[in-house]
Amino acid sequence: MKIAIGGLSIESCTFSPLLSQEEDFKIFRADELLENYPFLQTYHDVSPIPLLYARALPGGPIEADLYERVKQEFLQKLDENGPLDGLFLHMHGAVSVEGMEDAEGDFISLIRSKVGKDCLIAASYDLHGNVSSRVMDSVDILTAYRTAPHIDWSETLERAFFLLVKCLRAGVIPYKAFIPVPVLFSGEKTCTEWEPAASLYRKIPGVISGDEVMDASILIGYVWADEPRSSASVVTFGLDREKVQRAAKYLAQQFWDVRSLFQFGVKADSVDNCIQIAVQAVEQPVVISDSGDNPTAGGAGDTPYVLERLLALGITDAVVASIADAEAVQRCEAAGVGATVKLSLGGKLDPIHAKPLAVEVRVRSLQVLPWTLDRRKESSVMNHIAVVDALGILVIITERRTPYHRISDFSSLEVDPHQHKIIVVKIGYLEPELKALAAKALLALSPGAVNQDTINIKYHKINHPMYPFDPDFDWAP
Ligand SMILES: [Zn+2]
């Protein structure tokens, strides 16, 4: 069987002025693309054909020109390699493109028109994807992560591919059901490690039954995209039309029934209150999520607001990881280790949500490390990093927007997060290693493009009624 592989993955925040450009993407082609999917080796009856897979750290909308180039190359490769038995799409589901709505709908519907109706298309999605009817009209199979944090990302890719091959081998096209659920929350309120999402997601295996209902997905959606398709949804497929519909309706109803219970899993408070709670805590370290500027949700990652408040409150033992500012890193490099430098730090990438902070720092160390574009693959692009001391507060300044989610991200800079009272990370819910690190975890409702105060976001395009923006309305799937 000839199965082509490719896709486009980025979570893009339409409230960020920071357009995602070519340098933000890692584009996989040929063998390098296939290496992302080690499970392919177990399929002896499949000839995998690498097309193009573009992935980036979450950010703002993709530049229109770049999207067009990626799309055209993808479509051209489809032309060169057709006809196909199957197509495996590695997607995120929350792509936004400058000046366009429903980017995945555009991308996948064009692909469908190229490959024709006889080619089976399977897509692997992040559960923070916003699914549209246009997408569902174009795919045969769509399956999404069942965990947030996404510890099942590789399992999900494997499942999508397995289901595609299974349908191809059997020569069947499954029935599918798609129900948008008019609920829209942030990932931080819908983490599957706590209720009600934990119990909701545990209901998925119960509706899957052999070939009749082959798979089911619950998608939370992506709250920082002002588009008509933004909402939660349920997707099911299988060979028994009625059972596929029933399974989707059941999960959608279950989702709707718990809508009022979604909440932050740790104490959430203003930045100042989080700092005060951390200072008074007997345990150490206290990890504070600078959630409004989380680069892995689409924030700029350069807002210096929490640092500003730590300094204003006289805190002398904390680590701030991190602030993206290429210019500041250059100034530190020019001054050298041990030198004192006056910086105008951060607040440059996203001027809507932040302004630079004037601060005097001592350069503690300088490094050039491979840029961890995401946690899954090391990039060949280098990232210049300065660790500086601002009145006792260690600040990690990076040339590129960089998440600090693993202990090794800190230890590679000779910073031991266990030895400090307060660790500030630009993140929402904590990834597993940070969760293990935190003697106490707090979620700071900090400013930024991915502000967790979502109820006050000014949307123009989302559908109404939508819970919790419209708190009182009846709905049934
Ligand atoms: Zn996600």
Image (tube, grey):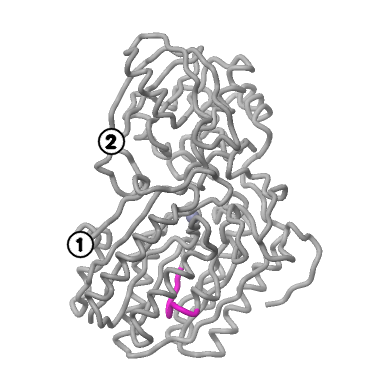
Does 141 lie within the magenta span? yes
What residue sits right under mark 1 in the picture? 30
Tag count:
2
Position of residue 241 measured from the top left corner of the image (x, y, whole percent): 52, 90
Q: Is 350 rendered above or below residue 93?
A: above
Report the amino acid beneath label 1.
Ala
Report the amino acid beneath label 2.
Met
Does 232 lie within the magenta span? no
The quadrant of the image that shows the N terminus is bottom left
Secondary structure of the residue carrying tag 2 is strand
Position of residue 398 measured from the top left corner of the image (x, y, whole percent): 39, 30
Magenta range is: 137-143
What residue sits right under mark 2 in the picture? 382
Q: Is residue 56 left or right of residue 455?
A: left
Name which quarter of the figure residue 101 lies in: bottom right
Residue 442, disc: none
Q: Is 64 rendered above or below residue 173?
A: above
Position of residue 445 measured from the top left corner of the image (x, y, whole percent): 64, 38
Residues at marks 1 and 2 touching, judged by CB atoms closer than 8 Å: no
Q: Is 94 rendered above or below residue 439?
A: below
Q: Is residue 191 left or right of residue 182?
A: left
Secondary structure of the residue carrying tag 1 is helix
